[in-house]
Image (spheres, rainbow, N blue to C red):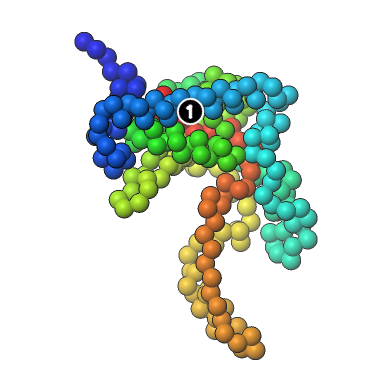
Amino acid sequence: MKVPSSRDTVIQNLAANGATLASPNEERLEDRYNTAVERLGTFVDENVRRLHAAPDWETFVQQEHGPSYLRANLQDLPHLSGDFLASLEVHGVPVAFDDQPWTLQEMEDAVKKGCHPTAQKHAVFIAQEMLEFAESGYWTILPYSEVRHLPGLRGSPAHMKEELDRKDRFLADHSNWGVNEHTLALAPKEAMQFGGTLYRLLYLIRHADPKYDIIYLAKFDFKDGFYCLHLRPKDAPSLAVVLPRY
């Protein structure tokens, strides 16, 4: 009796998922799988080479993400978050927890559990998505064997949110193994305002100075906006994500 390989399992899942693939033809599915894995493998090999060439982890991370998207001297902004943003520009976004660091065994167990079944089902899509993110400097992709002893390492399962009429969404499920639960909120409360948007807009419109005449409203959507805030290098391993097995 033949035991299905991980490649066979992915191809079978892809064939059953008409929303992700344009054609159920098995040869095309296998070609698409092989192409994605080959590109991913080449990219990971290059990452490993750069990791070994870097003097330390912090230098490697800084080389991967490049210069900050934030401008210098943000502490001079006439805004309550000026000093906080200036700190992010210099040091990166900190990640802190209210529990003990994971043990190596806890991390081994997380890797053994692997990603969410939806992620394995969409393994080719995730390979392509992660490559795009990594080439933009938003993620780095490395074998677990290269990072398993990094201080503070935690792993969250990759997850896919299947959408009906638009592109499926890759998710890092930090809620699954307690990462979200134990993360400390360090940003100022004014930094993010959820809810009450309509009320705040109506208030500002009502109390706007009439001497400025017509009021215009604008909405901006920054693509991958949060990825433009770099993590503090030493904290990056705590938000690691376990990808599908290829």
Residue 209: x %, y % from top left: 63, 86
Residue 182: x %, y % from top left: 53, 40
Q: Considering only vertical position in the picture, is 229 above or below 121?
A: below
Determine which residue is flagged by label 1. Answer: 39
Q: Is residue 176 visible in this depiction of the protein?
A: no
Task: Identify the residue at horizontal 35%, vertical 51% (top origin).
Answer: 166
Q: Is residue 136 visible in this depiction of the protein?
A: yes
Residue 51: x %, y % from top left: 64, 24
Task: Identify the residue at horizontal 63%, vertical 41% (top origin).
Answer: 231
The residue tagged with tag 1: helix, strand or loop? helix
Q: Residue furthest left?
A: 1
Q: Viewed as shown, does residue 89 lie left or right of 214?
A: right
Within 10 Å of disc 1 (Cα), the crowding (few <14, some 14-19, many 20+) is few
Which one is in front, 236 or 227?
A: 227
Q: Viewed as shown, does residue 49 lie left or right of 119?
A: right
Quarter that holds the N terminus? top left
Amino acid type for the residue under numbered disc 1: Arg
Task: Identify the residue at horizontal 40%, vertical 45% (top origin).
Answer: 169
Residue 91: x %, y % from top left: 72, 43
Which one is in front, 182 or 149?
A: 149
